[in-house]
Image (tube, rainbow, N blue to C red):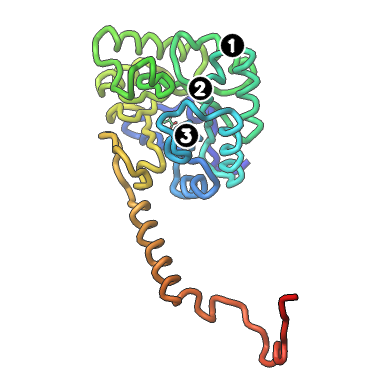
Amino acid sequence: MKTNKKSVPQIRAYKANEINPPIAMVTAYDAPGAHMASAAGVDIILVGDSLAMVVLGYDDTLSVTIPDMAYHTRAVSRSKPDSLIVTDMPWMSYHTGVHDAVNNAAQLIRSGAEAIKLEGGANRVDVIKALVDAEIPVMGHLGLTPQSVHAFGGFSVQAKTREAAKKLLDDALAIEEAGVFSIVLEAVPDVVAAKATELLKIPTVGIGAGPHCDGQVLVFHDLLGLTFGHKPKFVRHYGSLGELGIKGLEGYVHDVKMRSFPSPDEGYQVSQGEFDGFTFDRK
Ligand code: KIV
């Protein structure tokens, strides 16, 4: 086992404070992305079902399946990151019963995931307990749970009323009790995320949930400027890989059109005289 490799017990025991800096988590869906995340010191790589939107071009996360998530988990896992690998259980892979959930999660673990993440609160307690009982570590996800896009009527901030905040906190305590080792809080008011973080013994990881969580998570393509549509207000750009990529590709197109690529040095030559007198005609 590599010494810098992050583990579930390490994360479970972690709470950010004056001494402990917050956990840094990012999504990745392939070997180069995972390599970059690990080299940058990311603690947790999430093979997120955001794959559907930022890589596969869907409008929501509902179209990805266990085979899709397993395929991308294998790619991430092959780069052997120091970061803990957590993979999202896609929509309908844990909604049809505990038996389906355990079998589907097992496929992700066999593909290289070291834990799985699923969305929901008290309604998922039975599934979480069964997974934990099968030795599969589970990360929870509350607030704006993108698999509920139709139930919510869109991607909107959650827990904005006292009643909804109370429900979120009840859900957080219920899934902690069921055995999750940490909880993602997405698009909830800062004050609600702060309260959850204070109440829970396990770490919270926020996305659009303010600065008081035990960690932060962003989508790789959002933070590196590789998404081209609407930018949610909680995304900060740390690079413009999309623009850089277009500039690079423009240079390539230009050089091909101008016949300046490839140069003789970028091809393979034979020794002088090798093809003297060589002819080959179409029959
Ligand atoms: O799929 C994903 O990228 C996620 C993050 C937004 C937490 O679930």
Q: Earlier in the sequence, mark 2 or mark 1?
A: 2
SS for callout 3: helix
Please report contact status of discs 3 and 2: CB closer than 8 Å, yes or no: no
Residue indicated by mark 2: 91
Name the residue nearer the viewer: 280 or 116: 280
Say which element carries label 1: loop
Q: Is residue 176 above or below residue 265?
A: above
Q: In which quarter of the image is the C terminus?
A: bottom right
Q: Which residue is denoted by mark 1 in the rendering?
A: 97
The image position of residue 220, as x and y in percent, is 41, 42
Residue located 30% across and 22% down the image: 156
Quadrant hosting residue 147: top left
**Helix, strand or loop for disc 2:** loop
Q: Tell me the residue that label 3 is attached to.
A: 52
In the visual, does 30 lie left or right of 57?
right
Q: Which of 113 and 203 is in front in this view?
A: 113
Q: In this view, does 247 lie above or below 129?
A: below
Type of the residue with mark 2: Trp
Residue 20 appears in view: no
Residue placed at 34% from the left, 30% from the top?
A: 207
Q: Answer yes or no: is residue 7 visible.
A: yes
Percent position of residue 120, x then y: 44, 16
**How far apart in space, not on screen, are marks 2 and 1 (Cα)?**
13 Å
Earlier in the chain: of badge 1 and badge 3, it is 3
The numbered mark, 3 or 2, whose residue comes first in the sequence reads 3
- State the separation of the CA atoms marked 3 and 2: 11 Å
Q: In this view, does 187 lie to the left or right of 109?
A: left
